[in-house]
Image (cartoon, rainbow, N blue to C red):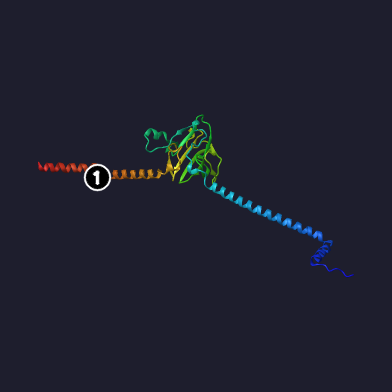
Amino acid sequence: MSDKKMTPQEEQISKLRKLTKKRWFYPAVYLCAAAVVMIGSLWIQHSMSDNQHKEKGQTALHQGKNEAIPVNSAKEVFKWPVADKNAVKVAVPFYDVNADATEQAAALLNYDNTFVPNKGICIVKSDNKSFDVMASMSGKVVKAQKDDLLGYVVDIEHKDGVHTIYQSLASIAVEEGQTVTQGDVIGTAGTEKLMTDLGPHLHFEIRKDGVAVNPTDYFQKGLASLDDVNKATEKTSVDKQNNNDSESNVKENTPSPEESSTSTDQGDQTDASHS
């Protein structure tokens, strides 16, 4: 009896059965499946890691921008550099060149029997105790060091050439290059050799392009309020120059006592000759 001829499909099934009877078949299938699962897991982890790095990079970029430029500093107004302005007073005011003699005398600083105009205001607490000194406006610390005459000094730079300066500090809580937010504690009030009789106090200044202004005129005002400082300074300089020129012209056209005497003598002689 002859064997029945198998169809191609039956031949493939027969070969597969013989293959599955091999001792290595199932371990090989298991290893291939495990490899596929592992490769899939690694690919998913790699994709998630890339997304996390991108998110961190974007977050770091935004944080870096925030550190470089103080948030909302352009919209802020100058605040008193203390927690409670009602608990302090101005012991020595700003020296105003346009004030009367009494006000100017009250704004002089005395050091070693030498009087110098006060370019800021000296703030003291009512109970003559030390107090925390706070940033009047957000900005970047460009100076934080001790001075033999002025005590610890902190200089904070703002936009448009504006600086706030804090002197006579007993200690400081910031360092150069640091970005501070309005209201941050930058130090404590102390004493300095320039005005030892005041006790613990803060010498506070606001400057625009190096020109000192009266801080009490700019509290609750923004940076834009200082835009006319340079114009006013230039006008004052021009007025002074014009006054000096006028005085020079008056002096040039006014004869000296000797010249007046000579003119008078010559006039008398002329009159005598006519008589």
State the residue lying farthest toward the top: 127
Name the one closer to the observer, 253 or 63.
Answer: 63
Q: Residue 187's image quarter?
A: top right
Q: Residue 238's image quarter?
A: top left
Q: Is residue 88 left or right of residue 259?
A: right
**Residue 172: x %, y % from top left:** 55, 40
**Which residue is depicted at the point 75% across and 58% down?**
35
Q: Is residue 248 left or right of residue 159?
A: left
Quarter containing the C terminus: top left
Tag 1 secondary structure: helix
Quarter containing the N terminus: bottom right
Q: Residues within 10 Å of mark 1 (few under 14, many from 20)?
A: few
Name the one closer to the observer, 15 or 209.
Answer: 15
**Residue 45: x %, y % from top left:** 68, 53
Q: Residue 96's image quarter?
A: top left
State the residue lying farthest toward the bottom: 2
Quick check: can you spot residue 261?
yes
Quick check: can you spot residue 113?
no
**What is the total number of numbered labels drawn onto the structure image?**
1
**Residue 244: x %, y % from top left:** 31, 44
**Which residue is depicted at the point 12% across and 41% down?**
272
State the residue lying farthest toward the right: 1
Q: Amino acid at mark 1?
A: Asn
Q: Is residue 29 left or right of residue 213?
A: right
**Which residue is depicted at the point 19% across and 43% down?**
263
Find disc 1 in the rendering and name its residue.
253
Q: Is residue 178 above or below residue 27?
A: above
**Residue 124: x %, y % from top left:** 49, 33
State the residue lying farthest toward the front: 1
